Amino acid sequence: MATRKTLMTILAIGGIGAALAACGGGRSGDTTAASTAADADTSLSGSIVIDGSSTVAPLATLTAERFKSTAPNVNVTVGTSGTGGGIEKFCNGETDVATASRAIKDEEKAICDEKQVTFKELLVANDGIALVANKENTWATCLTTDQLAIIWGPDSKATSWKDVDPSFPDEALKLYGPGTDSGTFDFFTKAINGEEGASRTDYSPSEDDNVTIKGVEGEKGGLGYFGLSYYEQNKDKLSLVQVDGGSGCVAPDVTTVQDGTYAPLSRPLYMYIADAAAKRPEVAAFANFYVENEPTLTVDSLFVPLSTEQAATMKAEAEALAG
Amino acid sequence: MNGANRTATAAAQRSVRDALTGRQHRSITATVFMVFIMASTAVGLIALAVLLFTVLQDGLPYLDPVLFENGPSMDPNIAGARPAIMASILMAVVLVATALPVAIGTAVYLEEFAPKDRWWIRLIELNIQNLAAIPSIIFGILGLAFLVRGIGLGPVLLAGALILGLQMLPTVIIATREALRAVPDTVRQGGMALGATRLQVVRREVLPAAIPGIATGSILGLSRAIGETAPLLMVGAATFVSFNPGLLTQYTVLPILIYQWIRLPQEAFQGLAAAAIIVLLAILISMNGVAIWMRNRFERKW
């Protein structure tokens, strides 16, 4: 009896499946994996353990993936324990590389010192937070940081756009943003409300930025924020809001994020590489690989590439590693 | 059997059926209760149906050989889940080989051999029940402090499997004890009356009779462990692993990969995540299939 029922259930699921499969879709491009590069270095082996910020994860993952095709025998793993968790493991000597969406804190440095873990700091990419509004929102093309604080402040009572600025229409304010675990949330709250984690709580939080996109897309009075990369993937669905940090309206783009004029919502991203780990040829090769391919790696993982000076500084740090 | 007798039996059956389905004399309370329990069932079933439908709708187009052949990639066209699928299966195998024997052994000892009136036995029982209610992340912290750092195992698959095993112990122990308790005492007494030792009775009579219940309990524990994410992230499971996992290598498992893919901005990864969910469901359903097969194979009625 039980077996027959189970069989029926499986058949039913399979039936629905077959019906749905007919809908098509799926992968649209070339599904052959990138072949190993012609100049692949098979003499390199060993493993590289990377852990840290989930913001930096797409960049670290893409670098690991492409590095693999030039050094097929090196096993690179990327974890996402968060910036704090990643640095903790790094200072405990458990990982070779820590990725971070902020610079290492002094107290974290002290722990590294205590464990005699020395390292080099590489500024590897720039990140900007994009504020997005509904396509039909014609009034909020530029918001000042004060207005953003009115909207997102921990004690905010603003429920309508009119509460933000009397010249705005009386359209209900529907807020979307990342959940409290997100590095973007920490960064935004610190930059706008002055304290990490200080935010009004009656908005729709989601760790999945696609939820924010869908929400803002569907609400005329919608407003949300997330990494610039998400906006670039969904340009057609939302409109970008400029930010006035005290010296005029600035839209986030390559130059304004690189030079920090898109203040206060742009930030540098880091990789910390242990000196001890860099003595291993595979780790040194990985660092060099990043330095050489930084422009394509950052752009392909939807971050803003380094400026010329930033790139020069990173190169110098990476060379200091090898030395 | 004569005709009158048959009619009487049929009438009796009908009245029993009517009582069960409440066709006659149904009070308002009974109706309300009936509606309530049917609605409760419907909530679960509808949620499950919607979930299955959306997952299949999103995932099936992406359920292709590439998913099983390739490693993860930031390019959705070539991204696959091979290392994660292998690690999830390997993890299930390790759990079956380590946690199940320990859990079943513990349950058999506590139920069949342990002196029930000793304070330390009661202490163990109380602790097992408490363990079952501990949030999984706490097990992760224990694993990090004790296995990964304490004895220096490092963030390897074996460490993750052991900690998941520890987490599923209470579930399996409690289910196994229930199954053993459901075996009538007359079976034990009968065996011993025929001169069998306690061990022989347990091995030849009680355990085989309890297998259906044990299998169900084991699958419950195993399924939960296979779908677990939080403690593994704690003990250092990576999110990007492109090589085939071994017992002593870094690893990632399907739930972590699904979580990772869902967070990526490209829409194709939402589909890939759904496809990975289908694979995870298939693994769980096949494990359930084994349990159902065992239940039917060993089921006994007294």
Image (cartoon, grey):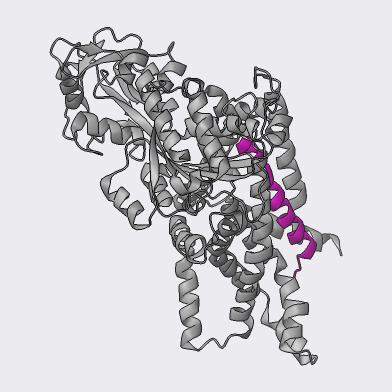
Percent from the top left, x then y, of residue B42? 54, 41
Q: Residue at x 64, y 35 (%)?
A: A71
Percent from the top left, x then y, of residue A211? 42, 27
- Judge whether residue B280 is colored magenta: yes
Residue B263 is at least partly visible in this image: no
Q: Spot the residue most to the left.
A: A166
Of residues A66 and A244, the one drawn nearer to the viewer in this rendering:
A66
Q: Main secondary structure of the magenta part?
A: helix
Q: Quadrant of residue A217?
A: top left
Quadrant that contains the C terminus of chain B: bottom right
- Judge whether residue B210 is colored magenta: no
Of residues A129 and A74, the one drawn nearer to the viewer in this rendering:
A74
Of residues A188 and B19, the one drawn nearer to the viewer in this rendering:
A188
Q: Quadrant of residue B270?
A: top right
| As drawn, A84 above or below B19 | above
Percent from the top left, x then y, of residue A134? 34, 14
Q: Residue at x 34, y 14 (%)?
A: A255
Q: Quadrant of residue A197?
A: top left
Q: Spot the residue most to the right.
A: B1
| As drawn, A319 above or below B215 | above
What range is drawn magenta here?
Answer: B276-302
Percent from the top left, x then y, of residue A14? 72, 34
Q: Residue at x 54, y 54 (%)?
A: B155
Of residues B281 and A11, the one drawn nearer to the viewer in this rendering:
B281
Quadrant that contains the N terminus of chain B: bottom right
What is the tally of numbered marks visible in this picture?
A: 0
